[in-house]
Amino acid sequence: MISALDPLRALTPLSLLLRLLLAMLFGGLIGLERGRKRRAAGFRTYMLVCLGAAMTSVLSQYLHVMMNTVWLEYASLSARQIDMSRFGEKVFSGIGFLAAGTIIVTGRKEVKGLTTAAGLWASACMGIAIGAGFYECVVIAFALMFFCIHFLPAVEAYLVENARNMNIYIELRSLESMGELLGQVKALGVQVYSVEIDRANGEDRRYPSAVLSVRLRPHQPHPQILAALSEVTGVTMIDEI
């Protein structure tokens, strides 16, 4: 343990701000790397989850201090030992089911709702902190969550649009066009990571579809790739996911 950091381990406004900012920063950096690779959970999702987890840790420390100081008289009335870390257990398990219901996988194999689920979970953490009267933590956490949800989507969108990794959803009239499609991809100098093919049958009245995971050359614009692939014979629909 570094003794110089001991003042930052105490529950002070400066310590709270630093802890939550670090959680937001480091969670966001990990999510940024995943977002640039076009994974379902990206920049803001990792940021919100890490921020919520930091809040629960700080809240447990706060409750422990309160139970041994301000609330000591009430705690002494109980014959049982109180575990502060379990106060929000039922809330977290309950919000897990609610958050899971917001996550869907579309027909294009695209995962949606992860950031909403992360926001719900982080809000539940904030609600527990409000109920415990940890107002300093609540104010800081609310400001950071509001900033993350309202101001960072544009940053995330810019980073994703300029990422070298790209997932492309394509619908074809028949699978016979797949060879020409892959040939066009290689002609563009694009590296193909994986190809997922959905062989539609006649009963569902859908065209066959494919999801391509590719890596572009440096500074190669996404719209240019989509425009070039849309000219392949047999392509009925194309979109980036």
Image (tube, helix red, strand yellow):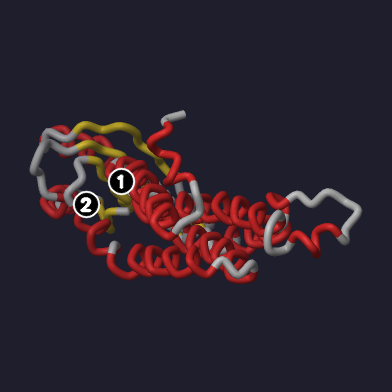
Point 39% across, 56% down: residue? 14
* Residue placed under numbered mark 2 in the picture: 159
| Residue 56 pos. (x, y %) | 57, 54
Amino acid, disc 2: Leu
In contact (CB < 8 Å): disc 1 and disc 2: yes
Relative to 65, 54 lies left or right: left
Instruction: Using residue 72 as the reference point, say whether residue 138 is left or right of it.
Output: left
Residue 63 can be seen in this image: yes
Rendered position, 189 above or below 80: above
Label 1 CA crowd tier, 10 Å (few <14, some 14–19, many 20+): many
* In-front residue for pair 129/190: 129
Q: Residue at x 52, y 59 (%)?
A: 103
Q: Is mark 2 on a helix, strand or loop?
A: helix
Query: Pointer 2: residues within 10 angstroms few (<14), some, or many (20+)?
Result: some
Q: Mark 1 points at which residue?
A: 32
Picture layout, residue 165 above or below residue 61: above
Work out whether residue 218 or residue 213 is closer to the camera in this orientation and state it: 218
Between the C-alphas of marks 1 and 2, the distance is 8 Å
Image quadrant where residue 197 sits: top left
Foreground of the two, 211 or 209 = 211
Q: Position of residue 137 (x, y in %)?
A: 49, 63
Kindly state the secondary structure of the residue where label 1 is placed: helix
Query: Residue visible at 71% across and 52% down?
Result: 84
* Name of the residue lying farthest toward the right: 79
* Position of residue 203 measured from the top left corner of the image (x, y, whole percent): 53, 57
Residue closest to the eye, 49 or 127:
127
1 or 2: tag closer to the N-terminus:
1
Number of numbered labels in the structure image: 2
Q: Label 1 is placed on what type of residue?
A: Leu
